[in-house]
């Protein structure tokens, strides 16, 4: 009996996944293969990702220290010392964006309660449900008073992108819904509310989940996970051995792999880390520079 066989009555093997893994499959099965199975080298780093990671790291550092150390000067120090200098056009652009990132971080923290102690900072939460072993890392988990007089966990996700967010973004986010379920399981505390904190526009998009909305998200996650698990099994069982033939241009091997891992080409392929490996994505999109995801001016980015 091989490792894939099971006896009658044995529990079904859970598919291990994160929200990012599920969304990757849903967006483009070919990108899923490149990311998790083929593990193709990525393209050049994106400057907007450097901005986002630098701000996230600074916020993490600010919240994990003792309350008396949570000063705005400390926030400035954390952005500057932790600045990720990748993907920018040149040193001048990097310095400009370090200043912008510092401003948005300080403006955000100016409105935060210095004495508040989050229930989790970049906390990994997990749960097993619907045939999946789900896990993910949450930017921040707050413990707040609820409307019925008790306490509940609130999922907070930081955003630094160009586009302002609204409550529909919070409602429709699969990741945030998974975090609600997983945080409740991990921390043994009720959770319903999710928030997207968009630092550039100084706005908060929020939604309070019900058991019904969470069940719908989990049902969607289960469907995606089932598809990804079947494709992954096919890759491990027969397709991976054909990858070398496919890379050499074998039409039959390429067709067999693409049948299970089809591309989903569109304009967003321009932002894909694996565009150079994907002829379909190249045909569907234009070449972008690593800094093209940055706002062109402070007004567009919401930092003025």
Image (cartoon, rainbow, N blue to C red):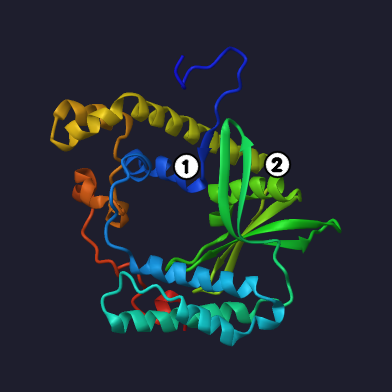
- Tally of marks: 2
Q: Is residue 252 above or below residue 97?
A: above
Q: Is residue 198 above or below residue 227?
A: below
Residue 211 image label: 2
Q: Position of residue 100 (x, y in %)?
A: 44, 81
Q: Position of residue 1 (x, y in %)?
A: 46, 14
Q: Nearer the viewer, residue 163 or 18?
A: 18
Q: Nearer the viewer, residue 107 or 35?
A: 35
Q: As drawn, is 58 to the left or to the right of 31? A: right
Q: Position of residue 34 (x, y in %)?
A: 31, 43
SS for dot 1: helix
Q: Residue furthest right?
A: 149
- Residue at 61% from the left image edge and 78% from the top image edge: 109
Q: As drawn, is 228 to the left or to the right of 190? A: left
SS for dot 2: helix
Query: Which residue was labeled with disc 1?
Result: 22
Q: Position of residue 166 (x, y in %)?
A: 54, 61
- Residue at 57% from the left image edge and 30% from the top image edge: 131
């Amino acid at each position: 009996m091989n490792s894939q066989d099971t006896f009658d009555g044995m529990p079904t093997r859970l598919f291990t996944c994160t929200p990012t893994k599920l969304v990757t499959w849903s967006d483009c099965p070919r990108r899923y293969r490149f990311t998790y199975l083929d593990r193709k080298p990525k393209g050049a780093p994106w400057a907007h990702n450097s901005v986002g990671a630098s701000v996230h790291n600074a916020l993490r550092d600010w919240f994990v220290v003792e309350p008396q150390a949570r000063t705005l000067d400390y926030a400035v120090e954390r952005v500057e010392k932790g600045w990720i200098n990748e993907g920018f056009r040149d040193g001048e652009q990097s310095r400009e964006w370090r200043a912008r990132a510092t401003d948005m971080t300080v403006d955000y923290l100016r409105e935060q309660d210095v004495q508040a102690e989050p229930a989790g900072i970049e906390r990994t939460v997990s749960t097993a449900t619907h045939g999946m072993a789900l896990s993910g890392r949450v930017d921040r988990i707050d413990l707040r008073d609820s409307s019925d007089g008790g306490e509940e966990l609130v999922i907070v996700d930081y955003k630094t992108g160009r586009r302002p967010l609204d409550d529909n973004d919070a409602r429709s986010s699969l990741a945030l819904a998974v975090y609600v379920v997983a945080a409740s399981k991990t921390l043994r505390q009720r959770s319903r509310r999710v928030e997207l904190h968009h630092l550039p526009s100084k706005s908060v998009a929020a939604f309070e989940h019900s058991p019904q909305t969470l069940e719908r998200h989990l049902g969607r996650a289960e469907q995606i996970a089932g598809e990804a698990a079947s494709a992954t099994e096919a890759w491990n069982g027969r397709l991976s051995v054909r990858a070398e033939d496919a890379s050499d241009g074998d039409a039959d091997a390429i067709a067999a792999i693409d049948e299970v891992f089809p591309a989903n080409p569109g304009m967003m392929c321009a932002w894909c880390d694996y565009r150079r490996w994907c002829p379909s994505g190249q045909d569907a999109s234009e070449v972008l520079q690593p800094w093209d995801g940055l706002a062109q001016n402070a007004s567009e980015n919401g930092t003025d």
